[in-house]
Amino acid sequence: MTAIVNHPHRVTTAIADVRAELSLVTAASVWSMDAAETAAAIDEVSRAEAQLAELKARLLTHADRIEVAGSTAASSTANWHAVTTATTRSAAHRMMRIAHGLERHEPTRAALAHGRLQVEQAEVILRALEELPDDLEVEILEAAEQRLLDLAHDHDAKALRVLGRRILEVVSPETADAHEAKLLEREERAAAVATRLTAYQDGHGKVHGRFTTDEHTWAALKKALMAMAAPRHQAASGPLGEQRPSPERMGQAFAEYVHRYPTDKLPHAGGLNATVVVLLDYDSLVGGLKAARLDTGEKISPSLARRLACEAGIIPAVLGGKSQVLDLGRKKRLHNEAQRIAKTIEVGGCEIEGCDRPPGTCHLHHPTRWVDGGQTNRDGIMICPWHHARAHDCRYQIDPLPSGKYSFNRRS
């Protein structure tokens, strides 16, 4: 308050007066206010917040011009504002963007300054205007801004965002299609760069994750999941009257989508189709209680393993049946599918000590290099791509360990 008292500008005086008035009602009870007065008071507070936000934005642009941040060697006005007011940097930078936008668009600034616009609405309008073509005529730009301000009287920020994307269809139909095409192309490029999928196991049998993808990929996935989650489809696996909550139905549909994806459409990983292999012994297959293991390392119950076996191909490893050649000598350089499956059953992943990469991502490495006369036999070492590169690095040698694993040691 001292800084404001010592600088009697009209703005600082007004701020001091507002704070002084608000201080008088900090402990005032509101129980005697009826519904109409309460609603009116909330509306007035919202308008006052908008006016204060506009004033704050104007002060921030002024602070930027006179380089207030230089007094503390801050890298920008936004960072200075974040530190000075204990605001998060993301919020401070967002407010700075709004401030610069309001400086460029006077009608929007005036509407916010008079409390006719909420901050969220102003931000949406400014973003819509920024996305318009750079070579747009000034008259069209001004018409678009005024039209958005008119729409803000009856629409919240979410609806205004949708309307803002189509504003050129109203004020300049002849340029709308070309603008929309450019806008969509830019968004699609950004979505392609931002595509992500992350997941983690919680240690209690569940996997949690999140993803980011482009809209057309989501549209295709959503359509498939909605078809699987439809009530008619669900009735085939449960009582006719059963109606699961929508998130549960979609989750079950996603699991079904993964399990039903055609394996012959999957790429090969390490010489095998990128399908999950279930490893279990004969006793578990016919009703035993011993847990089964996936080739990716996870354990599953014997009942789930038996259910998966109903719709899967079964390869007997020790039970007899049609034998498969596991020794190829020098006839072929690459290990075949039977050898890879056998190695998966035996070692279950990268054989380098301390590495836990699953077999689906691993290669089979010749202990004696193929070019030096090595043979493509059962003695191949299952090894992940990272360690495979080290295995062919002349600076290292692979040494067997008593545990059956291998280690790298730098050559002397």
Image: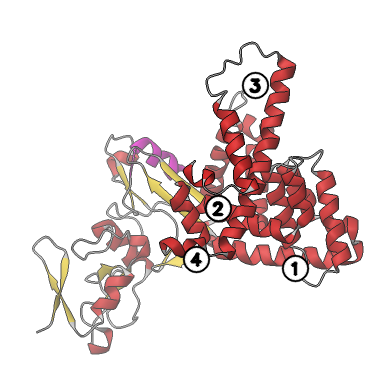
How is the protein colored in the picture?
secondary structure
Residue type at mark 3?
Gly
In primary-sequence order, the first of circles 3 and 2 is 3
Label 3: few (<14), some or many (≥20) within 10 Å? few
337 or 241: nearer the viewer: 241
Give the answer, above or below, for where 190 lies relative to 167: below
Q: CA distance from mark 3 to mark 1?
A: 48 Å
Tell me where residue 349 appears, x and y as whole percent. 28, 60
Which residue occupies the extreme top position in the image?
32
Which residues are drawn in magenta? 299-312
Separation of residues labelled 2 and 1 (CA atoms)? 35 Å
Q: Position of residue 191 (x, y in %)?
A: 61, 61
Disc on res. 67: none
For the point 46% across and 42% down, which residue is it?
A: 310
Return the residue at label 3: 241
> Which of these two is toward me, 29 or 323?
29
- Residue 227 visible in the snapshot: no
| Residue bearing the label numbered 2 | 261
Q: Quadrant of residue 410?
A: bottom left
Residue with the mark numbered 4: 267
Tell me how far mark 4 sits from mark 3, CA to CA. Answer: 40 Å
| 99 is within the stretch colored magenta | no
**Residue, disc 1:** 182
